[in-house]
């Protein structure tokens, strides 16, 4: 099976006899929080649903994997989430056979709003067709780290461009990195996976500019420096390779 980003999309495609679509960070309900801050944006959930359905049709998707943070509000669930989360999965049921979700830090009580055909996995992640999947805000299971590839989210990665006149622009990006074996093996012996950090599927979200010198990535594997970020490869969503992170610092 082959795992690769879909060009110009914040999504991975796992190609095989039955294709799988992998996305992360839907944050359904973020508009309710924005309204409390005085920013009135109509719900984008229907737009995301149509986007997912379009990808499922185009790539003949059998399974859907969501790498955490389906919902946004914590610790409570907003009225928007109460109505929209069940609805989006009702729509998706017409286009995928099975959905898998690993719980993110925003997904408290998520199971109360999901239909039975959606499989929920804990915060420590799960393995799927030989790939380790976890959101990134907790330590993963050992089985996850024993896979050859690990996919996480949680970081909302972007790349910061600073123009000569000081103008700043950020764009979503993919981060591909190695773990630092001598550090990783203390907690995960005989583990040496390749890491992919996913961009967010919801484009209303902000992000961490991974190349900004004072930025800090989130979660225990990052804070405990298990990942070789200096040599991480950075790609734009259109597939453009920008270089190693150490060469892109601003």
Image (spheres, grey):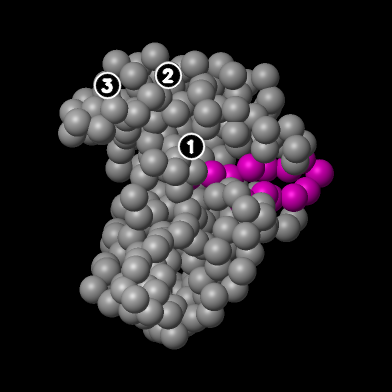
Name the secondary structure under disc 2.
helix
Query: Which residue has dot 2 on it?
Result: 84
Name the secondary structure under disc 3.
loop
Choose between 115 and 250: the one closer to the eye. Answer: 250
Q: Report whether residue 102 is seen.
A: no
- Residue 196 as seen in the image, left or right of residue 25: right
**Quadrant showing the N terminus:** bottom right
Query: Which residue has dot 3 on it?
Result: 78
Query: Which region shows up in magenta?
Result: 12-24
Q: Earlier in the sequence, mark 3 or mark 1?
A: 3
Q: State how many labels appear.
A: 3
Q: Main secondary structure of the magenta part?
A: strand
Task: Check the image and report above or below for 148 versus 117.
Answer: below
Q: Are marks 1 and 2 in contact (CB under 8 Å)?
A: no
Residue at left offset 66%, top offset 55%: 7
**Quadrant showing the C terminus:** bottom left
| Residues packed near mark 2 inside 10 Å, few (<14), some (14 to 19) or many (20 plus) | some
- Residue 195 as seen in the image, left or right of residue 81: right
Query: Which residue has dot 1 on it?
Result: 101
| Residues packed near mark 1 inside 10 Å, few (<14), some (14 to 19) or many (20 plus) | many
Disc assigned to residue 117: none
Q: Position of residue 124 (x, y in %)?
A: 38, 49
């Amino acid at each position: 099976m082959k795992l690769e980003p879909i060009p110009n999309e914040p999504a991975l495609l796992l190609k095989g006899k039955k294709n799988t679509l992998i996305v992360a960070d839907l944050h359904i309900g973020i508009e309710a929080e924005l309204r409390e801050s005085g920013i009135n944006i109509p719900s984008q959930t229907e737009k995301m649903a149509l986007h997912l359905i379009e990808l499922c049709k185009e790539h003949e998707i059998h399974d859907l994997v969501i790498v955490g943070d389906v919902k946004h509000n914590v610790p409570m669930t907003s009225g928007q989430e109460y109505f929209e989360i069940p609805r989006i999965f009702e729509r998706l049921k017409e286009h995928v056979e099975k959905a898998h979700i690993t719980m993110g830090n925003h997904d408290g009580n998520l199971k109360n709003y999901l239909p039975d055909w959606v499989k929920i996995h804990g915060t420590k992640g799960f393995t799927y067709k030989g790939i380790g999947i976890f959101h990134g805000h907790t330590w993963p299971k050992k089985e996850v780290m024993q896979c050859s590839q690990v996919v996480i989210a949680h970081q909302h990665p972007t790349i910061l461009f600073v123009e000569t006149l000081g103008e700043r622009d950020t764009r979503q990006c993919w981060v591909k990195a190695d773990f630092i074996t001598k550090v990783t093996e203390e907690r995960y012996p005989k583990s040496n996976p390749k890491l992919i950090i996913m961009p967010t599927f919801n484009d209303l979200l902000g992000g961490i500019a991974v190349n900004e010198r004072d930025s800090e990535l989130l979660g225990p594997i990052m804070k405990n420096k298990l990942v070789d970020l200096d040599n991480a490869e950075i790609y734009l969503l259109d597939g453009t390779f920008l270089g190693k992170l150490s060469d892109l610092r601003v």
